Image (cartoon, grey):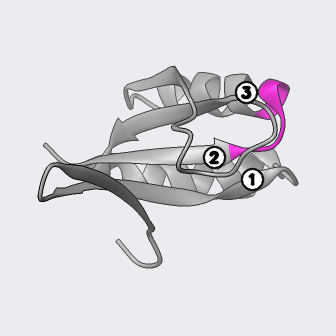
Amino acid sequence: VMEIIAVFASRTHTMQFVRCMRASGASATVINTPRQIMSSCGVSAVFRAGAISVARRCITMGRFTSFKGFYQKIVMNNTTHYVVVKNV
């Protein structure tokens, strides 16, 4: 299952995003931001890639100015990488 990480510079925005996702019927969880992703608040939200349209709607509706982007976790040769998701 492909998961997407939504990264914010604000802890409050992360929590509000998760609430919006859940209120819209999509599962989302607060996680510690992986250290490979630069973020100032330390927490991000993770959700299934199938809910990306709901996530984009939540970002737009919430006017989350601290939103830094969506990232996908990729493991290659036992090394974890995070790539920016442009169009899913």
Between disc 1 and disc 3, whose residue precedes? Answer: 3
Kindly identify the residue that appears in the image at 59 percent across and 55 percent down. 57
Secondary element at image label 3: helix
Secondary element at image label 1: strand
Q: Looking at the picture, does residue 41 appear above or below residue 37? A: above
Kindly identify the residue that appears in the image at 52 percent across and 58 percent down. 70
Q: Quadrant of the C terminus?
A: bottom left
Q: Position of residue 33 (x, y in %)?
A: 57, 34
Kindly identify the residue that appears in the image at 81 percent across and 40 percent down. 40
Between disc 3 and disc 2, whose residue precedes? Answer: 2
Q: CA distance from mark 2 to mark 1?
A: 6 Å
> What's the residue type where badge 1 is placed?
Phe
* Residue tagged 3: 16
Q: CA distance from mark 1 to mark 3?
A: 12 Å
Q: Which residues are magenta?
A: 8-13
Q: Is residue 39 magenta?
A: no
Q: Looking at the picture, does residue 11 appear above or below residue 79? A: above
> Of circles 3 and 2, which is in front?
2
Q: Which mark is residue 7?
A: 2
> What's the residue type where badge 2 is placed?
Val
Between disc 2 and disc 1, whose residue precedes? Answer: 2
* Residue tagged 1: 67
Q: Quadrant of the N terminus?
A: top left
Q: Position of residue 85 (x, y in %)?
A: 44, 69
Q: Are marks 2 and 1 in contact (CB under 8 Å)?
A: yes
> What's the residue type where badge 3 is placed?
Gln
